[in-house]
Image: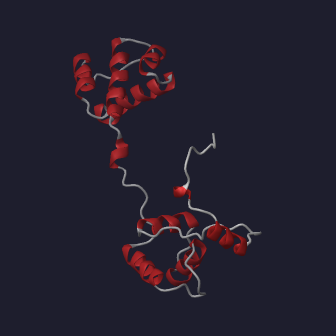
């Protein structure tokens, strides 16, 4: 494996030692060992990567120099928001009032509102993420069994003693 003469062996080792980012440090270490003459398989064993990763890292170093080994994920701003700040403000205003068909706001209801009022077709994931970012929480009624006997429950509450008054170990032993 040939390594371009961007940096000397000592300079590569200094980059390994002074790199703050672990990804960058790892990549410089691979290039350092390649410059020492190790094979991709040997370097892969040292760096706990695949020989293909080693070859790609050295190829990137040869093509772009030391800058090519930087972790560029830190500069990635990510995907732009689906709704502008103005549209988000409109959504927040709409959520302050009940939905057009009454009841509580749900993800599908809000998605329909966004499509009708803002002209944007979104899946439910961005809708739920937006609600979460705005501080809204899921409200679900407490589950009730379909065959519950409410009168029997109330009678039980009136006749049984609270647990805090019981004495002795729980197992009865």
Does residue 161 appear left or right of residue 17 in this picture? right
Q: How many marks?
A: 0
105 is higher (above) or lower (below) than 102: above
* Residue at (37% x, 11% y) in the render: 37
Q: Tell me, yes or no, if residue 6 can be seen here.
A: no
Q: Position of residue 8 (x, y in %)?
A: 24, 19
Q: Which of the 4 quarters of the picture holds residue 77?
A: bottom left
**Coloring applied to the structure:** secondary structure
Left or right: 86 as drawn, with respect to 94: left
Give the x, y percent position of residue 96: 44, 83
- Is 115 situated above or below 65? below
Where residue 43 appears, as percent x and y from the top left, is 43, 17
Question: Split into 4 quadrants, where in the image is the N terminus?
Answer: top left
Residue 47, x across and y down, in percent: 42, 21
Viewer-proximal residue, 132 or 54? 132
Front-most of residues 156 and 69:
156
Q: Residue at x 52, y 66 (%)?
A: 128
To which quarter of the image does residue 65 belong?
Answer: top left
Q: Residue furthest right?
A: 147
Q: Quadrant of the C terminus?
A: top right
Q: Residue at x 50, y 25 (%)?
A: 52
Depicted 94 relative to depicted 154: above or below: below
Report the side of 75 relative to 120 (left or right). left
Whether residue 157 is visible, yes or no, is yes
Please tell me which residue lies in front, 159 or 143.
159
């Amino acid at each position: 494996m040939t390594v371009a003469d961007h940096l000397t062996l000592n300079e590569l080792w200094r980059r390994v030692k002074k790199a703050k980012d672990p990804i960058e440090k790892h990549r410089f270490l691979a290039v350092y060992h390649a410059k020492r003459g190790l094979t991709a398989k040997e370097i892969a064993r040292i760096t706990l990567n695949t020989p293909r990763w080693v070859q790609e890292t050295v190829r990137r170093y040869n093509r772009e120099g030391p800058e090519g080994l930087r972790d560029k994920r830190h500069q990635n701003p990510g995907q732009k928001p689906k709704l502008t700040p103005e549209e988000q403000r409109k959504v927040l205003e709409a959520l302050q009032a009940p939905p057009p068909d009454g009841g509580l706001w749900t993800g599908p209801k809000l998605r329909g509102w966004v499509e009708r009022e803002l002209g944007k077709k979104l899946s439910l994931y961005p809708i739920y993420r937006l609600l979460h970012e705005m501080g809204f929480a899921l409200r679900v009624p407490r589950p009730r069994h379909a065959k519950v006997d409410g009168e029997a429950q109330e009678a039980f509450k009136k006749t049984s003693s609270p647990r805090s008054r019981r004495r002795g170990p729980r197992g009865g032993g």
